[in-house]
Amino acid sequence: MGWQQSLQESDASKVRTIYLNEPLRNSFCKNSISTAKYSIWSFLPRYLYLQFSKAANAFFLFITILQQIPDVSPTGKYTTLLPLVIILMVSGIKEIVEDYKRHMADKLVNTKTVIVLRENTWKTIMWKEVNVGDIVKASNGQFLPADMVLISSSEPQVTCYVATSNLDGETNLKIRQALSETSEMQTEKQLSSLSGKIECEGPNRHFNTFVGTLYLNDKSPVPIGPDQVLLRGTQLKNTQWILGIVVYTGFETKFMQDEDMHYRRNDVYAMARTSNLNEELGQVKYLFSDKTGTLTCNIMTFKKCTIAGIIYGNQSEKSDTDIRKLSLSPSVITESCEFNDPRLLYNFENGHPTKDYIKEFLTLLCVCHTVVPERDGNNIIYQASSPDFLLTDEAALVKGMKNLGFVFTARTPTSVTIEVMGENFTFEILNILEFSSNRKRMSVIVRTPTGNLRLYCKGADTVIYERLSEDSRFMKETLTHLEYFAKEGLRTLCVAYADLSEEEYQQWLTQYRKASTVIQNRMQSLEECYEYIEKKFLLLGATAIEDRLQARVPETITTLLKANIRIWVLTGDKQETAINIAYSCKLISAHMFRIQLNLNSLEATQQAITWHCEALGTQLSKENDLALIIDGETLKYALHSEIKRSFLNLALSCRAVLCCRLSPLQKAEIVDLVKKHVGAITLAIGDGANDVGMIQMAHVGVGISGNEGMLATNNSDYAIAQFSYLEKLLLVHGAWNHFRVTKCILYCFYKNVVLYVIELWFAFVNGFSGQIVFEHWCISLYNVLFTSLPPFSLGIFEQCCSQKSLLAYPQLYKISQAGNTFNTKVFWFQCLNALIHSFILFWMPMKMLEHDMVLQGGYTTDYLFLGNFIYTYVVVTVCLKAGLETQSWNKFSHIAIWGSIIIWLVFFAIYSFVWPTIPIAPEMAGQVKMVLVCPYFWLGFFIVPIVCLTLNLIWKSIRNTCKRTLLEEVREMESSRAQKFHPTIFRKRVEAKKVQMIFATPPHEVVLQSESFDQSIPRGYAFSQVEQAVITQEELIRSYNTTKSKQDKVTMDSSHSRQK
């Protein structure tokens, strides 16, 4: 096997030596982790470094430094310093709060407890105290604190089961087996006497590989591979206890490589990892989604079946004609529920002509499987030995049979017992013909209670149908029903049987025993042997299992596709299952061609990708009505530097992309590929630790609070509970957030350009002397106080249109997605607008006061008198401009606009009287008396802002009339409703504009060779067995005897090991 390569083949500098029971010789990384950014001592220097790494803060720091030099800056020393300090303090408090939460989360992980062997006895210590070389004891349900080598367990064959969903997203449990040389070491005395060392590869991030060797004193070296390794973050399942030797700790564990994270149990609340706004949420073009736990619920349900040409299930009242029509119609999704059709048992109990077929069908599903029954009092709990307790397809079928009165009650190494209507029947298990992806089926050869030999088989319809006998019936009807099941997105299995003669079986058994002892290509020899006896089947029917989707997943995906968001599903699951789910959730439609890439070499992958790119011709890199399906093995070659760009061009030519059997690293690599080369905003969504890489790689990361812990949510920008909430998150909050942020940015640029360019115009008047027209503190408080509320109003409460409209017309998302509201053209137009306003705001008052004037009491005007005129007009104009930009008026909008104007006037009145009581701004003394009594001031107060904003009103009217968009149509329709006008005419115009947008850039219709592009709807077969595991399926299930207690089984197995 690959993992048995010598350590010399790996990088010698990375070889690690771990001495057993010699802790002083093992000096490696600590097991404590820290995901926090700061410590008490590093906070101030690191925080300041991060803040002044931002261009804006660095610029204002530079300005602040210049302002401290009197001969350089005409403004006050504190006009920029004070606002900058306030901003840094607020941001610092936010960082402290968020980092405190990270410290608390780290503490929860580091202080978890585990049992280790210390000083020849078992002691309970915290996770952070675990060291390399420690012998750890873990119990059922516990998460493992470090990477360790399994040395013993409570289970038969010294195996254990671990849930790895935190690592790879797969819900089926993995089997690990201890070495036979250490299997009997269970007591403190035996473990303390262990003497030797482990040599292994250095820390790395590859989950599925491990190269090591165990050297026990006075014994031959023993190779250690991935089947003996238990990783940090995995959970022990269906196993009383295990013992392991720690090989990697802390950030050197495979779970923590490249990943600044920690895991959660389900009872730990999610918390926000950042409070930063993300305007990119409204510009997402590519959505990368996990499948298991994100699109699906991880619940398998037996929904329907067809027996002897009769369909049973919650839609069984439909006629065969209706079924044929449905099998040819677009995909339909039914409500999730258990199998419920009383006709099946009625036909069985009342002598229906198909009674014998029903009995044989139900019996087969009770016998032909790898499920293990465990009793909990009077209840039977079915756990699949593949295994994934109640979530696997097999367990769902066996549970379904139980509800129909065919109860699987016991398993021994040589038999299974079922209870049918209160009567027990025992079937002797002679041989198990194992499932594999190539075979797409599994079979068992049994001796029935009547002494007959029979072969039961279940598998994909394609492999079952080609092995049917000429005497088999109901083939056409069953095939029609299979098509109907596929349209519903159900996973199907055909079931069939064959009677065997003693002579035929004995001949085959001789061949089987010979194939079982072949040294080279044993699996291939066995599969060829299986072919010899798996023939001349008699078809019984088919089952249909629902891999239940989360609520509203199909509708959500349909809506997101209308919003011009391309969806790529990245999953670690099998290809057949993933394709089936893609059809169920309407990611792939019935009329869509499929490109499937399943290759095993770089050359073959390059040839296939090149051929498909050439076949697309001019349609390459344009959106076509195609679906690309690729597995992890092929993707490994597709991401090679020579063909990576060609693969990306092919993927971008498809409307949907489905990547199967991926590692967490491959998921992140795909996101990175699109992020770097396409220039579009990406979003990744997942629910498990295996999704953290792609969540962190994408521009926007979304975590789902699911059954796989809180890692995904803790490492994401946004946390949601269901995939369907993504619709509202993107189309509503994403669009709103983008409109708000862009308007806020543009408005802030506008109002600052207006104010500060006036100083430029004044420079032309004062001969560029450096004199400023405004008072120092008025300049400082311009952004902090007098014009601070309108940006808040726009940035928090602005809405382009209502939530209802955004969900009803997902095409509106294209406006923010394309960046139509914020781009270079829009920015410079806003700057030009501000330049024009500043020109009007300066020169109109300047011309009004051009000849000077004498006020009451003999006072004459000065530059500051003009400055207060202009400053007041600036505040009024920019506040009213915010009102002109506001599309969703509310009380906060009024408070922000009118309140800001009032705040300035009140401040102006008070500020004119503070000197000499407060020794600041003596030049402002008495200014309010002079300004407010001047008739020119009030004349300009109304005329100047109106002149400025009239230009904007004219431009806005022309644009909304001549270049009307869907958004304007929707807003007018909403306005008509608000004013109680009849909205029918507006609705028709909106629908017309919507259709226009849909067909503006439709997916290209492709004409391709049928032998390369598949359009048939797959009928996904339901299997969950682990292939090429550390022990075979037959060895595994033959190790169980559910008629004995758990302790009896362990004792019996230990005795058996000693005998061997």
Image (cartoon, rainbow, N blue to C red):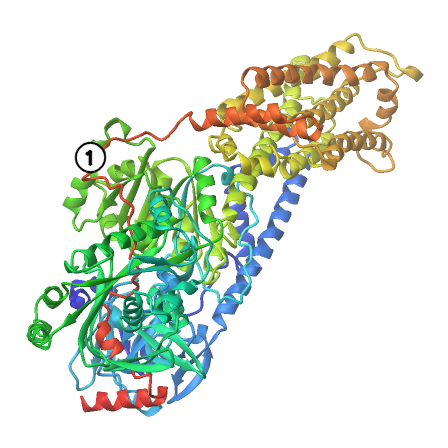
Q: Is residue 458 above or below residue 44?
A: below
Residue 921 at what x, y percent from top left? 79, 31
Residue 175 found in image quarter: bottom left
**425 left or right of 994?**
left
Residue 372 at what x, y percent from top left? 33, 76
Position of the N terminus by quadrant: bottom left
In the structure shown, which secondary structural element does the residue marked by tag 1 occupy?
loop
Query: In the image as oriented, which residue stretches furthest toward the right?
Result: 857
**766 left or right of 730?**
right
**Is residue 687 in view?**
yes
Nearer to the camera, 455 or 557: 455
**988 left or right of 33?**
right
Nearer to the camera, 175 or 45: 175
Residue 682 at what x, y percent from top left? 42, 41
Three-letter code for the amino acid on which mark 1 is drawn: Gln
Residue 443 at what x, y percent from top left? 21, 68
The residue lying at 73 percent from left, 34 percent from top is 896
Residue marked by disc 1:
1009
The residue lying at 30 percent from left, 64 percent from top is 1024
Position of the C terminus by quadrant: bottom left
Nearer to the camera, 264 or 440: 440
**874 left or right of 182?**
right
Residue 758 found in image quarter: top right
Q: Is residue 278 above or below residue 446?
A: above
**Is residue 662 in view?**
no
The residue lying at 85 percent from left, 28 percent from top is 925
Residue 657 found in image quarter: top left
